[in-house]
Amino acid sequence: MTRVVIPWPDKRLRTAAAPVAEITQDIRKTWDDMVAVMEAMPGVGLGATQLGVMLQLAVVDASEARGQVVRMANPEVLYASGKMNVHDEASPNLPGVHARVSRPRAVTVRFLNADGAVEQRDFVGLWATSVQHQIDHLAGRMYFDRLSRVKRDMLLKKAAKVGGRA
């Protein structure tokens, strides 16, 4: 089954996803679909809610060579560094626009991995940005929610002109 990203302002993008009880074959298939969509964009991460799947599932691959995908269920930030990084962020749900967003440079995240085990992992740089971006999606937040009201309004107006919506 080919999945597609849902367009902004679909209400599912503003809805928190449900936790995953266990890693099943259906969950693994959803992760595989998410990786395929992420690679086709191409992007460095994807949250299941971006595809209209209302489960706390995310995939991230910020490696330069690719092929180092981290599959996460129920990701939760346990620790965030005080040092911030600014990255240009975008979303396939709102194509044609992007913004510079400040987030903690490093995070420690706990999640269920592909084997169904609880894993705790440190992410730094673009990896940390992408993980936090996906966790926001799973909580019903978009990257532009981290902008000032003026910048957010400008971005959404530009998106409406570019894509005919917003």
Image (cartoon, helix red, strand yellow):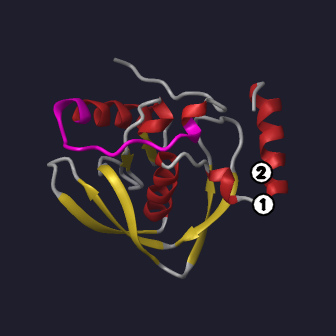
Q: Is residue 62 above or below residue 122?
A: above
The secondary structure type at the circle numbered 2 is helix
Q: Which residue in the structure is indicated by mark 1?
A: 148
Q: Residue 97's quadrant in the figure?
A: top right
Q: Who's the residue at 59% across and 34% down the image?
A: 93
- Disc 1 is placed on an element classified as loop
Residue at image mark 2: 152
Q: Amino acid at mark 2?
A: Arg
Q: Circle 2: is it few (<14), some (14-19), or many (20+) Cα within 10 Å? A: some
Do tag 1 and tag 2 residues touch (Cβ < 8 Å)? yes
Judge from the rendering whether residue 4 lies leftward or rightward of residue 96; answer left or right.
left
Majority secondary structure in the magenta region? loop
Q: Whole-percent x and y of residue 152?
A: 77, 51
What residue sits 24% from the left and 53% below the top?
A: 112
| Residue 24 lies in the magenta stretch | yes
Can you tell which quarter of the image residue 14 is in?
top right
Left or right of 69? Residue 15 is right
Location of residue 110 with respect to 112 vertically, above or below: below
Residue 158: x and y, percent?
82, 39
- Give, as a single range, the part of the protein colored magenta: 13-27
Q: Which mark is residue 125?
A: none
Where is residue 61 drawn, in percent x and y?
38, 51
Residue 51's spot in the image, x, y percent? 46, 30
Residue 9 lies in magenta, yes or no? no
Which residue: 50% across, 61% down? 129
The amino acid pointed to by label 1 is Ser
Neighbor class of circle 1 (other Cα within 10 Å; few <14, some 14-19, many 20+) is: few
Q: Residue furthest bottom?
A: 82
Q: CA distance from mark 1 to mark 2?
A: 6 Å
